[in-house]
Amino acid sequence: MAKEKVVLAYSGGLDTSIIIPWLKENYDYEVIAVCGDVGQGKETEGLGERAKKAGASKLYIEDLRDEYVSDFIFPTLKAGAVYEGKYLLGTSHARPIIARRLVEIALAEGATAICHGATGKGNDQVRFELTIKALAPHLKIIAPWRIWDIKSREDAVDYANAHNIEIPVTKKDLYSRDRNIWHISHEGMDLEDPANEPQLDSLLKLSVSPEKAPDEPTYITIGFEKGVPVSIDGEKMAPRPLVEKLNELGGKNGIGIADIVEDRLVGMKSRGVYETPGGTILYAALQELEYLCLDRDTQAFKRQAAIKFSELVYDGKWYTPLREALSAMVDSMEETVTGEVRVKLYKGAVTPAGTKSPYSLYNEDIASFGDSKELYSHKDSEGFINLFGLPLKVRALMNKKNNG
């Protein structure tokens, strides 16, 4: 009889490399490895040979980069979603698209189960499994870190060495990193103590430290249509090349380095350093355009909704009615967020340097200090203040009466 199949979310990193022989030893499954390419770069090179050496029957490398930017990154950007005020959700919104492809391949292959290498202390286990439950609730889920005897990354290295499994790390460099087209995260080792200053010069992969950035600023102009970035310096660009270009420009100028102590969904705090150079530029530029194009009430409500949107993405609830409804609302809000934003990049900072839009709500005739009687008269403010302040005046009169 043919063996049952398991689809493994495979990155070629330490954890997923040793999971292949572990699955074969403990479940006697045929292991089908799947790598979702969301912009890991050279990390995908040679994966086929390594996966098969480790015992996988086949490897799928699925190019998800364009769809990832268009359908996951940009909707989150449009929503203004930032988790706990600092994290631009680089790992969070990559997991749903990878997990969806795992489900699609599992169904095509007739697999019994899906396996992932997320730890029992992390958020990714939730993100992978909620997507699987939403799209294919009948599939079995295997999470080795929750059941095997391996307790640390050092133990994992020992297991790999004992089984002659090629791995891309050593015990001297055991940072846990996650890289995609949007960002790279760094966790573990000396970063586990929040009192330690990150050693940026040896840690960073996408950026230079602000101190090593050029002494002259870089100016760029980003064009948006309905809240979606579409051009740099007047040149129309597809979503993925646009993000890649901004990563390059931002990285050279030390943009988007965040040292974060965040609240994980599973209840603990964790510390990491995230590099999101292009994303940091886009969030800053889009906000400047919204200041110009959105009215006060819409901006205020959008900021509140952004917090909930960030929590949904962080918690792995991408495929939920609420996230879909919020995205529809954001799409409506951003209908007039079209224009160009010029920004200055200098030693880690993104500074606005001019914004324009055909849908600008800024009216110089009203905003100037002069008196424009057709649109606004200084005298109008007196009646407004009297009515706006009436509750305060009534309360003050009451207090005066009762206090004698």
Image (cartoon, rainbow, N blue to C red):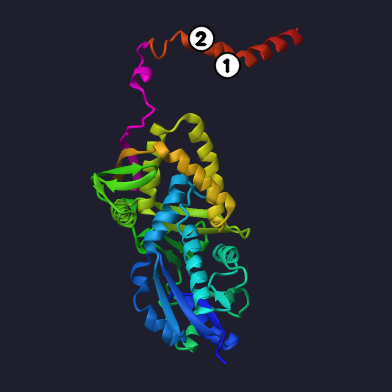
Of mark 1 and mark 2, the one earlier in the sequence is: 2
Give the position of the N terminus as an image quadrant: bottom right
Give residue 172's position: percent from left, percent from top: 43, 74
Q: Which residue is mark 1?
A: 388
Question: Per the image, is 351 magenta?
Answer: yes
Q: Please rate how many residues cluster around mark 2, counting C-alpha atoms within 10 Å: few if below 14, some from 14 to 19, many from 20.
A: few
Secondary structure of residue under mark 1 = helix
Question: Per the image, is 355 magenta?
Answer: yes
Q: Nearer the viewer, residue 126 or 230?
A: 230
Q: Residue at x 29, y 47 (%)?
A: 231
Do callouts 1 and 2 mark residues in contact (Cβ within 8 Å)?
no
Q: Which residue is mark 2?
A: 382
Give residue 394's position: percent from left, percent from top: 67, 12
Give residue 313's position: percent from left, percent from top: 53, 54
Q: Please rate how many residues cluster around mark 1, counting C-alpha atoms within 10 Å: few if below 14, some from 14 to 19, many from 20.
A: few
Task: Give, as a single range, the part of the protein colored magenta.
Answer: 347-372
Give the position of the C terminus as an image quadrant: top right
Q: Residue at x 62, y 13 (%)?
A: 390
Q: Residue at x 55, y 66 (%)?
A: 128
Give how far apart the Cα atoms at labels 1 and 2 are.
10 Å
Q: Nearer the viewer, residue 341 or 272?
A: 341
Which residue lies most toward the bottom here?
1
Is residue 257 placed above or below 61 in the rendered structure?
above
Q: Amino acid at mark 1?
A: Phe
Q: Amino acid at mark 2?
A: Glu
